[in-house]
Image (cartoon, grey):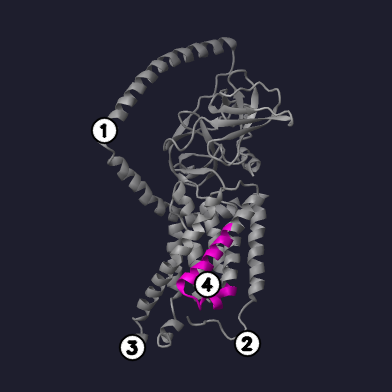
Amino acid sequence: MIDTSPPPFFKRGLAPTLRLAIFSGLALFLMVADGHFHYLNTLRNALAIVINPLQHAMNAPVRLSAKVGDFFVAQGRMKSENADLKEQQLMLAGKMLQYQDLQAENAHLRHLLDAKTRYAQRTTLAEILYSGRDPFSRKIIVDRGSLQGVQPGQVVADQIGVIGQVTRVSPAVSEVTLITDKDQAVPVQNVRNGLRAVVFGNGEAGTLDMPFMSFSADLQPGDQLVTSGIDGIYPPGLPVAVVSKVERNAAYLFAKVSCTPSAGPDRQRQILILSAPNPPQMEAAPQKQPAQVDHGKR
Amino acid sequence: MANAKPTLTRPASGRFILFTLLIGLLLNLLPWNGLAKLLWPDCIALLLVYWAIHQPREVGLGAAWFLGLLMDIADGVLFGQHALAYTLMIFMAQILRPRIQMFSFWQQALYVFGFLLISLVIMLVTRLAFGAAFPGPLYFASSVIGAVLWPTLSILLRLSQHRKSRTDDTFTNLVKK
């Protein structure tokens, strides 16, 4: 090929090494500002305006192909699926009757006890667009954003249990950090005995850790863990995980507890975004919550 | 090659380079899932290396840095992660440029593999420094695939340059050859 660089006696701009120093210095500066101090959200949002339409454009064919695929699902599968769903619906209808009865009874009893009625959950149905493209983190992108009232910090669940939490919102899409993302924490409670704990993601799909559980903690494989609700972000009672393994080694101060998440985004494409449970005493907090959540993560 | 010289002294226009980089960005934004996500090569990095080698005046560290920043936003990752990786990668390419130009496409691909690997390693190191988990050895697979695609990419881009040049007066020079 032809050498297009000028002879060395022509002066043109800064020396390459100086340029390298400037640009990598700038990059490092941005990294620290973003990673440690979380200063750059406005800049990110500004540049996201450039990128988002492109992302949408590239999502379109993928979504279209998924739709076309759905259209051509085999008749047999549709039929069996339909039968299954009808059966399930019948079962759920039975349970629903019971539930309404219980709810009425519960309301009545609460009224009698003069207790505050529980905050009713409003949910937004969203569809998973794709899993985040960063191989280092476990995130999914869903098709509801700030235009639909999604806010950072909201909890995301499917019909089985908690999936994760909304961490970043743009007008039409938002990013959900899964509970399996590294250091993502969920406060939980053991259904069997009410023991409170916090489970952490470890960056791998299908496992959660429960660190700092004392050697003698009453935990058994198979224990159901649900959200405890004491954090004010996760509503109480949502299934999170099942304890899969408890290792008690006398050499360590803490027991090593592994859990398997109950729900997962690999199973279906529809998910629910739960409205932020802001009871009266938390009214001032919601603006702060996302920042805290974000901070705790890194 | 000597005859083709006039066509190649004014090769691709800045607009064409911008166009290819935009295409590369779009290809990078394809929402893959699962294994494909890890195997899909970094098209922006490939194109940056190509233009940094063939047209160092138009594409240099600045372009690498800015596109890296765009990729950081698109991926929603740590700010500056791609920017730093691309900047260092293109710097290496600039240093080795005179040597690389002597080689055949497949020999060049070996170098390109090295460049892509360096960018991946830089990103890995920065993310590990900020507390992420190692995503497994398959993380490096995209650099191999990128290198395999290099000869095809080079031929395609060079072809498009030739076709472009036929519209201006250098066409006659080509015909004489």
Q: How far is the residue under mark 1 from the one under mark 4?
A: 55 Å
Q: How far is the residue under mark 4 from the one under mark 3?
A: 29 Å
Marks 4 and 2: same chain?
A: no
According to the image, label 4 marks what residue?
Answer: B52
Badge 4 element = helix
Disc 2: which chain?
A
Label 1 packing within 10 angstroms: few (<14), some (14-19), many (20+): few
Q: How far is the residue under mark 4 from the one under mark 2?
A: 21 Å
The amino acid type of the residue labelled 4 equals Ala
According to the image, label 1 marks what residue?
Answer: A76
Q: Earlier in the sequence, mark 4 or mark 3?
A: 4
Q: How far is the residue under mark 3 from the one under mark 1?
A: 65 Å
According to the image, label 2 marks what residue?
Answer: A9
User: Residue B91, how many percent across, how many down?
Assistant: 60, 70
The amino acid type of the residue labelled 1 equals Gly
Badge 2 element = loop
